[in-house]
Image (tube, rainbow, N blue to C red):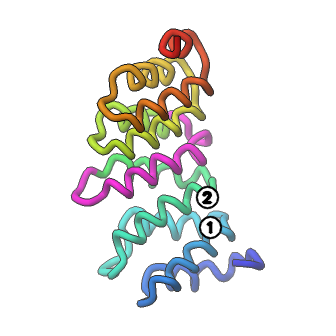
């Protein structure tokens, strides 16, 4: 990863998916994020989609993939991140939360899909960290629909963290709804 050699992506992806040592998997994932580009993005997106087979690290790999796809910032990751954000299977709160956070980093390239998934998460997700990260990420998008959703979250969300994130994001997006909600 230090030389940013794209030819190393396949070997790094294999290590990320299957090495028995967690530290090796972590180093491989970090190197994939540093290399970036289409091949690294696709390798991490495959892991995020759960295409690892019977990997002993499937859940952990999905969590880290969501995080590192945000670090790469490639718009090609939006579809996988949106799918992860909408995955309500058992034990996916951390994956959804990291996907929401990462959409802030990559969502502008496919604004509609990312924005809609984040709006849904802000309103409907049961996990407060998912809603918090959705609110934070929506601050990068703006627009009347986003303003209204953030204002509603600020005034109505049952948990403190999403309300705080909504307030901060409203400060970024501005607009009439933001001014009224923050007044």
- Number of marks drawn: 2
The rendered magenta stretch, by its main secondary structure, is classed as helix
Earlier sequence position, callout 1 versus callout 2:
1
Q: Residues within 10 Å of mark 2 (few under 14, many from 20)?
A: some
Q: Residue furthest bottom?
A: 20
The residue carrying mark 1 is 33
- Using the numbered discs, state the Cα–Cα distance from disc 1 to disc 2 in whole angstroms: 6 Å
Q: Position of residue 7 (x, y in %)?
A: 68, 81
In the image, 23 versus 164, the foreground residue is 164
Q: Vertically, is 149 above or below 92?
A: above
Look at the image and say whether residue 175 sits in the magenta stretch: no
In magenta, the rendered stretch is: 88-112
**Residue located 54% across and 65% down the image:** 42
Q: Secondary structure at mark 2?
A: helix
Q: Residue furthest right?
A: 3
Look at the image and say whether residue 95 sits in the magenta stretch: yes
**Residue located 47% across and 32% down the image:** 164
Q: Position of residue 91 (x, y in %)?
A: 26, 60
Q: Secondary structure at mark 1?
A: helix
Q: Vertically, is 39 above or below 5?
A: above
**Residue located 51% across and 12% down the image:** 177
The residue carrying mark 2 is 71
- Quarter of the image with the N terminus is bottom right
User: Circles 1 and 2: CB distance less than 8 Å?
Assistant: yes
In the image, 24 versus 58, the foreground residue is 24
**Residue located 33% across and 34% down the image:** 159
Q: Position of residue 168 (x, y in %)?
A: 55, 30
């Amino acid at each position: 990863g230090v030389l940013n050699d794209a030819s190393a992506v396949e070997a790094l992806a294999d290590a990320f998916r299957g090495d028995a040592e967690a530290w090796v998997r972590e180093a491989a994932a970090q190197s994939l994020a540093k290399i970036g580009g289409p091949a690294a993005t696709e390798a991490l997106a495959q892991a995020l989609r759960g295409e690892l087979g019977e990997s002993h690290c499937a859940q952990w790999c999905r969590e880290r993939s969501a995080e590192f796809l945000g670090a790469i910032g490639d718009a090609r990751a939006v579809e996988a991140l949106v799918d992860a954000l909408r995955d309500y299977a058992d034990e996916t709160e951390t994956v959804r939360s990291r996907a929401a956070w990462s959409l802030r980093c990559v969502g502008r390239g496919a604004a509609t899909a990312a924005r809609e998934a984040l709006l849904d998460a802000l309103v409907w997700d049961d996990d407060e960290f998912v809603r918090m990260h959705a609110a934070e990420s929506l601050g990068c998008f703006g627009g009347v629909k986003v303003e209204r959703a953030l204002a509603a979250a600020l005034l109505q969300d049952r948990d403190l963290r999403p309300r705080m994130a909504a307030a901060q994001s409203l400060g970024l997006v501005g607009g009439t709804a933001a001014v009224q909600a923050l007044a």
